[in-house]
Image: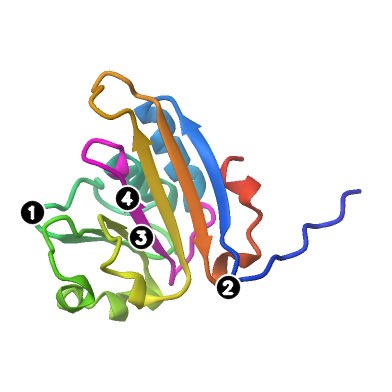
């Protein structure tokens, strides 16, 4: 019997790199990650246009069992998807059009929603980190200029004590 992995120092991020070969695999990654999420979690999605952030968010929504199709909230900035069961709602935010850090984000009251929801923020780098020290940062890389290549390289980094006990291998399980 294998001994459980010892939790690592919360100051050290929990990280994993995953290769995703298609939009369906990106959605499946979201469904798998949803099993790790709970109310109070902040997920930050980064990557250039067309990288697959919304596809991953769609998988998170499916995995969390929320109501409504998870689509890009670019023009409405944020959408709340209530749970169809006993899980937390998903708050899906697209900060692409928001220019100024947390001040502009405060109008969305994410700090009020965070304890009871899973908040997923696309384009949140430099804008939402002050909400919590505990967050899952997901960066999606794709071949620059090649719009036909569906392969994505995804880096998942769990920051803070919430993610300190999570074995990085579960990200790719």
**In this rendering, which labeled residue sits more in front, label 3 or label 2?**
2
The residue that label 1 is drawn on is: 75
| Residue 42, position as x, y percentages in the image | 39, 65
Q: Is residue 86 left or right of residue 36?
A: left
| Number of residues whose C-alpha sits closer than 10 Å to that of mark 4, classed few (under 14), some (14–19) or many (20 or more) | many
Does residue 64 appear in this view? yes
Measured Cα–Cα span from mark 3 to mark 2: 26 Å
Residue 46, numbered label: 4
Extreme residue in the left direction: 75
- Under tag 4, what secondary structure? strand
The residue that label 2 is drawn on is: 161
Work out whether residue 146 or residue 61 is closer to the camera in this orientation and state it. 146
Measured Cα–Cα span from mark 2 to mark 1: 34 Å
**In this rendering, which labeled residue sits more in front, label 2 or label 1?**
2
Q: Residue at x 52, y 60 (%)?
A: 158
Magenta region? 35-53
Q: Quadrant of the C terminus?
A: top right
| Number of residues whose C-alpha sits closer than 10 Å to that of mark 3, classed few (under 14), some (14–19) or many (20 or more) | some
The residue that label 3 is drawn on is: 83
Quadrant location of residue 149? top left
- Under tag 2, what secondary structure? helix
* Lower sequence index among marks 4 and 1: 4
Check whether the beta carbons of the residues at disc 4 and disc 1 lie within 8 A of each other.
no
**In this rendering, which labeled residue sits more in front, label 3 or label 4?**
4
Q: Is most of the magenta stretch helix, strand or loop?
A: loop
- Under tag 3, what secondary structure? loop
| Residue 172, position as x, y percentages in the image | 58, 40
* Lower sequence index among marks 3 and 1: 1
């Amino acid at each position: 019997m294998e001994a459980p992995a010892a939790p690592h120092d919360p100051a050290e991020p929990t990280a994993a790199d995953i290769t995703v070969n298609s939009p369906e695999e990106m959605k499946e990654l979201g469904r798998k990650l949803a099993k790790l999420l709970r109310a109070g979690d902040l997920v930050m999605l980064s990557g250039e246009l067309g990288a697959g952030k919304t596809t991953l968010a769609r998988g998170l929504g499916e995995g969390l069992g929320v109501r409504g199709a998870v689509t890009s909230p670019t023009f409405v900035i944020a959408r709340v998807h209530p749970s169809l069961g006993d899980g937390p709602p998903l708050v899906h935010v697209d900060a692409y059009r928001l220019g100024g850090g947390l001040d502009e984000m405060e109008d969305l009251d994410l700090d009020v929603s965070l304890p009871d929801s899973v908040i997923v923020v696309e384009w949140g780098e430099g804008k939402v980190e002050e909400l919590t020290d505990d967050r899952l940062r997901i960066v999606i890389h794709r071949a620059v200029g090649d719009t036909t290549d569906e392969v994505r390289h995804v880096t998942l980094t769990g920051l803070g004590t919430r993610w300190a006990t999570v074995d990085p291998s579960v990200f790719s399980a």
